Amino acid sequence: MTPERHSPTGTGDPLLEPPPGCPAHGLGPGGLHRLHEADDLEELYETLRAQHGPVAPALLHDDVPMWVVLGHAENLHMVSTPAQFSRDSRIWTPLKEGMVKPDHPLMPHIAWQPICSHAEGDEHKRLRGAVTSAMSGLDFRELRRHIKRYSQRIVNRFCEEGRADLVGQFAEHLPMGVMCHLLGMPDDYDDRMVEAARDTLKGTETAIASHAHVMEALSRLATARRADPQDDIAGRLVTHAAGLSDDEVREHLRVVLLAAYEATVNLIGNVLRVVLTDPGFRAQLNGGQMTVPEAVEQSLWDEPPFSTVLAYFAKQETELGGRRIRAGDGLLLGIAPGNVDPRIRPDLDASMMGNRAHLAFGGGPHECPGQDIGRAIADAGIDALLMRLPDVRLDCDEDELRWRSSIASRHLVELPVRFEPRAQQDIMQQPSHTPVPAPRDTWHVGIPKPAPHGAPRMPAYPPQPEPVPVTVPATAAAPPPAPGTGQDRPRGAWQRFLLWWRGY
């Protein structure tokens, strides 16, 4: 028997050298595609799907092998089968064999950390239980009030200018303000915190200093809640029966803050872009055929905030999507390609209204615990913005919009818009595109309002006009009617109306 020639992914499938002219020719060992060099990842995923089916081999930076799970059903199976697939990268064969260097660009995403999203078994239950409990005690009616107030505050910054960048001036600020409030550190929400979070997620040269700024704020919060627990996410984490250490509290606060922030920024930007560029979509929204929450859900299908999650790792030899997966192989959770799997979405233009079977928040034991918070921030925030600026319109050609893309996500760089300048509004008021009228004093029909001290008391009823004297001949004069007989009441139309008004 001819021995198998193992591919770089460790699958055992023979990968023959592609013929000249093949699009994959020369891209990497074995002709595999390098994901990080793709100009259009969406197009590449469809190419991989056509070539390999629902699970395809590919390469990360430094030609590190990785499976990309493209099928919807295959992704769900992977995330829902912890006996076969783990989030613990310490079992990843390329990492154990030294192929993945400490300075690998994706190490911040893949490196194991003592947090619930990388833990398994009883440890996962302990950490995940604390995080879920801390986030499940929220009053969502009160949460939406805070979202609208932060939205009002942010829109007040630019509403008088008549133009804005809805990514840099709105989408990147609203989630941070709300999350700082929910965590228990509203005073730490400022432009510096927003910039630090963005810089940390970009991985720039100053990312380490920015990350330190975020962690310093979270450390202060954890220390304060140890001394004085409050009814917020940090306070619930500190007092949970799982007994999290100070380091565990800080690390989970970091995960909650940064993951919720990045996901919600991308979600808000994606929904607003479609509203501003797709007349049919906006018409459905304005005409009542689609609500803002339904628009958000459609965006979670079409443009999920995270396109992939790095990564899952095979705990044993198994099979997925017709591919032989060896123990120690790495697999990308393909959220974006899984959401457009032609087996479940043969028509990508069809509405997915009411369908929450997308992969945007993962699934299984590691499904995103804060997804309802992200939905609420996007729903209420976008609704508040459109209420304040109903005439908002794109201030550039659609093809001029730019994205910053990576294997993990696709972030809209800016969304320039114009609108009619409007006055600022009280942040405690409901968002509106018209001036909010002053509150009317309470009053009751038939009960006069007490006059201010020193002011003359007004009559309870409108003054009755003086009757016009009429001269009649003496011979026609009659004695005045007796009081109380009903004949002494005035007979004019105005007098009859007044009597009716008074209830006679």
Image (cartoon, rainbow, N blue to C red):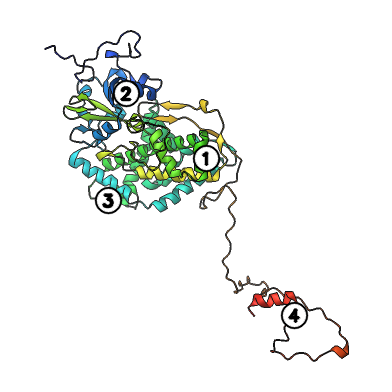
Kindly identify which residue carries mark 3: 239
Above or below residue 171? Residue 44 is above
Q: Residue at x 27, y 10 (%)?
A: 17
- Secondary structure of the residue carrying tag 4 is loop
Q: Residue reaching furthest top?
A: 20
Q: Which numbered disc, 2 or 3, marks the residue closer to the eye?
A: 2
Q: Which mark is residue 491?
A: 4
Assign a secondary structure to mark 2: helix
Nearer the N terminus, badge 2 or badge 4? Answer: 2
Are there few (<14), some (14-19), or many (20+) residues within 10 Å of tag 4?
A: few
Badge number at residue 283 = 1
Residue 342 versus residue 380: which sits nearer the camera? 342
Amino acid under disc 2: Arg
Q: Is residue 386 visible?
A: yes
Q: Is residue 57 above or below residue 440?
A: above
Spatial CA distance of label 2 from label 3 is 48 Å
Gap in Å between the C-alphas at discs 3 and 4? 80 Å
Give the farthest residue toward the left: 1
Q: Amino acid at mark 1?
A: Ala
Q: Which mark sits nearer the N-terminus, 3 or 4?
A: 3
- Is residue 464 positioned above or below 279 on the image? below
Residue 448 location, quadrant: bottom right
Mark 1–mark 3 distance (CA, rounded to whole Å): 48 Å
In percent of width and height, residue 239 lies at: 27, 50
Q: Give the spatial CA distance, label 1 vs label 4.
A: 59 Å
Disc 2 from disc 4: Cα separation: 92 Å
1 or 4: tag closer to the N-terminus:
1
Mark 1 crowd level (few <14, some 14–19, many ≥20, 10 Å Cα) = few
Quadrant of the snapshot with the N terminus: top left
Residue type beneath disc 3 = Thr
Residue, disc 2: 49
